Image (spheres, rainbow, N blue to C red):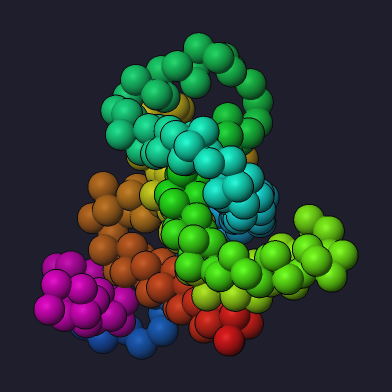
Amino acid sequence: MFYFLPFLKVIYYSFIKGQYQKSFVGFANYIAVLKNTYFQMACLNTLLMIAFCVPVFLAAAVLLSILYCGSGAVGNFLRKLTILPLLLPSVSVVAAFALLFGKIESPLPVYILYLWKYLGMGIVIVSSALTAVEPQLYEAARMDGAGFWQMHGRITLPLCARPIGFTAVLGVVYCFRTFRESYLYYGSNYPPDYSYTLQYYMNNQFLKLNYQSMAVSSILVTLTLAVFIALCMKRTK
């Protein structure tokens, strides 16, 4: 009701000329958006962010979850501590990052901000999956001479494949949610070219009342995420 039905109207907007000119234009809006220089740049920057941040996010979540789950009360405390960045106000966090990194000509501060803020949620999900693995499996593997990497590579990863796949999907979604922090960090609708992502493009189209362009970009992002989720589900299965 609250997601699918409004999305039908988004699809409708993608095939009309504009908000006030509701004539059907076919795929003209899609062609115009795909040829748009800013859209192409936003797609490239978004893909670069996903390609850099999500693997690091996933690897760190799995590794830290394994270390925390094996560290008793200390690990439990550290695991809870990783949730703290999600509870802090974005404005104060961004202000601290701005003081720390200054005017560095790189998207790296936003990438680090993404990892610092959302890594805790990935650790919570993977840790919950790890607690469901039978300890006897590790004991048997240890008695057979398996080392740390062998045990977790052949027991932990296969048995926790679905939660890890879900964490990867969340990692991609969190890349899109970092727009608020990125916007506060740069303080502009048009940040440096290397940090201009799809969220900036859609936000600017909204401000210009170009609903048809915003609708097209939303549909393209949704289709891309749907394909990614389908591939993750197939891989984890």
> In the picture, residue 190 is in which quadrant?
top left
What is the tally of numbered marks visible in this picture? 0
Q: Nearer the viewer, residue 213 or 234?
A: 234
Residue occupying the point 55% across, 14% down:
100
> In the picture, residue 232 is in which quadrant?
bottom right
Quadrant containing the C terminus in the rendered view: bottom right
Residue occupying the point 27% across, 53% down:
206
Q: Is residue 17 found inside the magenta-colored segment of the image?
A: yes
> In the picture, residue 187 is in which quadrant?
top left
Q: Image height check: is 215 above or below 39?
A: below
Quadrant containing the N terminus in the rendered view: bottom left
Q: Is residue 57 found inside the magenta-colored segment of the image?
A: no
Q: Image height check: is 147 above or below 191?
A: below
Image location of residue 141, percent across then percent down: 76, 69
Residue occupying the point 53% across, 82% down:
233
Image location of residue 109, percent across then percent down: 58, 30
Residue occupying the point 78% across, 63% down:
142
